[in-house]
Image: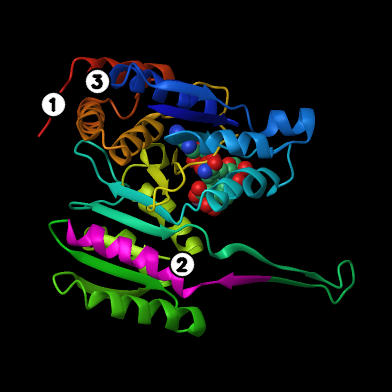
């Protein structure tokens, strides 16, 4: 297994160190190549993602990324020039973001019930496409545009993936989240694609919700969601919310998948570089560890992925959540649990 690792900025390297500790327990033979991309490299050389590095990254089975973004770099340079460029170049069209409330984890919702959903977020289009500009810049009549790009090809492949995932889950329920009452062009395309693909999945029940109302239900009745399919920006926002209601952003993992497998997929915590806590050794590495489990599942190493998930579940069920220990302590605990092959459920 050849893995490229991009620790990145802020808490990225801190949580990745722990994730690699855990990975080493399940796949000791994994070949790891580390790529120092991010704020430090940009300051030193002006480089974000050199072509040669992109070429090397393509030559791996998967990529593990910590986080990018730093207050010393103008907003968007690293996010667009590195993270989004990777997602676009490697055609990571399915951004998979599970959100599950593990036993023992406290939700900020008083009576949350069972929460177990996956958000299938479109990853290469929408408002992230970079289609826009500034007209009449530095005049009182300046105009800024950001055009959301939704192609029938791009929407269909993500919707198909979401239906396939829903069909494989016990509840077989899919919710399309959009804003069809205002974004009538893109909304029409997404709705029609969902309707067409649903004909091939009569076993999957389908619901539609506007994104604003979805934020209400995510907080008042999150248990209603099974699989959510949505566009790039709605998915970004909803998955921070889904993380918050399932115990916090420190637990939320994601996979940026090229489901055609032509390019390596990339796994990363949902959270960012968290400059407010970077360098303090207090970031929770669990999201990065669970991202390794998603990575292993993607590479067919299901048994190892289950071992990691079981260890996380055990740790979360037995953790003192008021004082969980620092980044290293959590990583050490998870590595020990994985090596002792703990089982739950
Ligand atoms: P953030 O996710 O970095 O932080 C939001 C809040 O969550 C902060 O209070 C932070 O301390 C907390 N937090 C995040 N990860 C945590 C963890 N593992 N354990 C405990 N607490 C954690 O979002 P932000 O502050 O909006 O962004 C900071 C930078 O990260 C920006 O430059 C942004 O562009 C970038 N960013 C990168 C990614 C990525 O690389 N995938 C994702 C989101 C944001
Ligand atoms: C995420 C982040 C990224 C996104 C940014 C940093 C480009 O917020 O992974 O959720 O918006 O997708
Ligand atoms: Mn985000």
| Left or right, residue 207 beside residue 11 | left
Q: CA distance from mark 1 to mark 3?
A: 9 Å
For disc 3, does the CB lie below 8 Å from ligand 1?
Answer: no
Q: Quadrant of residue 221?
A: bottom left
Tag 2 residue: 154
Magenta stretch holds residue 143: no
Magenta stretch holds residue 167: yes
| Element type where label 1 sits in the image | loop
- Figure check: 270 above or below 36: below
Disc 2 crowd rating (10 Å Cα; few below 14, some 14-19, many 20+) is some
Q: CA distance from mark 3 to mark 2?
A: 38 Å
Disc 1 crowd rating (10 Å Cα; few below 14, some 14-19, many 20+) is some
Q: Earlier in the sequence, mark 1 or mark 2?
A: 2
Tag 3 residue: 338
For disc 1, does the CB lie below 8 Å from ligand 1?
Answer: no
Region rendered in magenta: 146-168
Extreme residue in the left direction? 345
| Left or right, residue 82 beside residue 316 | right
Instruction: State yes or no: discs 1 and 3 in contact (Cβ < 8 Å).
Output: no
Q: Nearer the viewer, mark 3 or mark 2?
A: 2
Where the N terminus falls, by quadrant?
Answer: top left
Residue at 19% x, 15% y: name it.
340
Q: Position of residue 278 (x, y in %)?
A: 57, 28
| Element type where label 3 sits in the image | helix
Q: Earlier in the sequence, mark 3 or mark 2?
A: 2
Q: Position of residue 296 (x, y in %)?
A: 31, 34
Residue at 61% x, 49% y: name it.
85
| Left or right, residue 125 beside residue 39 | left
Q: Quadrant of residue 228?
A: bottom left
């Amino acid at each position: 297994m050849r893995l490229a690792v991009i620790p990145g900025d802020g808490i990225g390297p801190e949580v990745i160190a722990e994730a690699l500790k855990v990975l080493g327990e399940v796949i000791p033979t994994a070949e790891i190549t580390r790529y120092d991309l991010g704020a430090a490299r940009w300051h030193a050389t002006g480089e974000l993602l050199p072509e040669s590095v992109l070429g090397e990254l393509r030559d791996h089975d998967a990529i593990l990324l910590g986080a990018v973004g730093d207050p010393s770099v103008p907003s968007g340079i690293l996010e667009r020039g590195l993270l989004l460029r990777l997602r676009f170049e490697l055609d990571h069209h399915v951004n998979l973001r599970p959100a599950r409330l593990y036993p023992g984890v406290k939700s900020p919702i008083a009576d949350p019930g069972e929460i177990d959903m996956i958000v299938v977020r479109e990853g290469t289009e929408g408002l992230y496409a970079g289609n826009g500009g500034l007209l009449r810049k530095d005049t009182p009549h300046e105009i800024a545009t950001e055009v959301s790009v939704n192609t029938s090809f791009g929407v269909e492949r993500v919707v198909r993936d979401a239906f396939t995932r829903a069909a494989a889950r016990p509840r077989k329920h899919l919710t399309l989240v959009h804003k069809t009452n205002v974004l009538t062009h893109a909304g029409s395309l997404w709705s029609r694609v969902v309707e067409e693909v649903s004909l091939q999945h009569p076993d999957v029940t389908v619901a539609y919700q506007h994104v604003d109302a979805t934020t209400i239900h995510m907080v008042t009745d999150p248990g209603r969601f099974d699989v959510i399919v949505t566009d790039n920006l709605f998915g970004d926002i909803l998955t921070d919310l889904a993380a918050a209601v399932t115990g916090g952003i420190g637990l939320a993992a994601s996979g940026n998948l090229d489901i055609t497998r032509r390019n390596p997929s990339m796994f990363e915590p949902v959270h960012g570089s968290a400059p407010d806590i970077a360098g303090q050794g207090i970031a929770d590495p669990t999201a990065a560890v669970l991202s390794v489990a998603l990575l292993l599942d993607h590479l067919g190493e299901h048994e190892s992925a289950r071992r990691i998930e079981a260890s996380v579940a055990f740790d979360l069920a037995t953790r003192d959540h008021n004082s969980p220990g620092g980044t290293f302590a959590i990583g050490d605990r998870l590595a020990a649990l994985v090596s002792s092959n703990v089982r739950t459920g």
